[in-house]
Image (tube, rainbow, N blue to C red):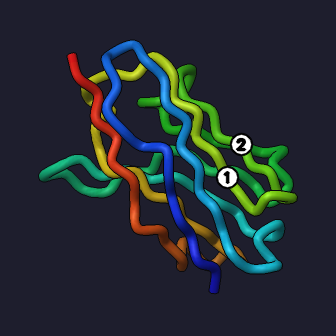
Amino acid sequence: QVQLVESGGGLVQAGGSLRLSCAASGRTFSSYTMAWFRQAPGKEREFVGRISWSGISTYLARSVKGRFTISRDNAKNTVYLQMNSLKPEDTAVYYCAADPDGSGWTDWGQGTQVTVSS
């Protein structure tokens, strides 16, 4: 099991940028596939993007592709979500999640709030 702590959320105007961080505990972080999800009020949790253990392979949801970038630094046990050209519809609580062995997103952080004003 890995402990995940997100940070970097906040209030930003439309068109602005934020970088979220997800710090992980555990020596095996570098072997985990990591992902970001988000949940807006009254909506279901939505997949945002994922990154392979090596960082070589990434995948982003269509709604954020071209605006968001996911990356990781295994030496720092941290995964990042760079969010550019933010829109009000990006407002949500953002969560990071870990998949240690391909069996699914078993470990979750507590979330960080992102609010984009118009």
Most foreground residue, 102 or 22: 22
Secondary structure category for the residue under label 1: strand
Q: Is residue 31 left or right of residue 25?
A: right
Q: Is residue 74 above or below residue 64?
A: below
- Tell me where residue 22 sits by quadrant: bottom right
Secondary structure category for the residue under label 2: strand
Tell me where residue 29 appears, x and y as whole percent. Answer: 76, 71
Q: Earlier in the sequence, mark 2 or mark 1?
A: 2
- Tell me where residue 26 sits by quadrant: bottom right
Find disc 1 in the rendering and name its residue.
79
> Where the N terminus falls, by quadrant?
bottom right
Tell me where residue 86 appears, x and y as whole percent. Answer: 40, 22
Residue furthest to the bottom: 1
Find disc 2 in the rendering and name its residue.
71
Most foreground residue, 11 or 43: 11
Q: Is residue 98 left or right of residue 86?
A: right
Query: Which residue is depicted at the point 44% across and 50% down?
Result: 47
What amino acid is found at the position of numbered circle 1 in the picture? Answer: Val
Q: Are marks 2 and 1 in contact (CB under 8 Å)?
A: yes
Q: Is residue 68 above or below residue 51?
A: above
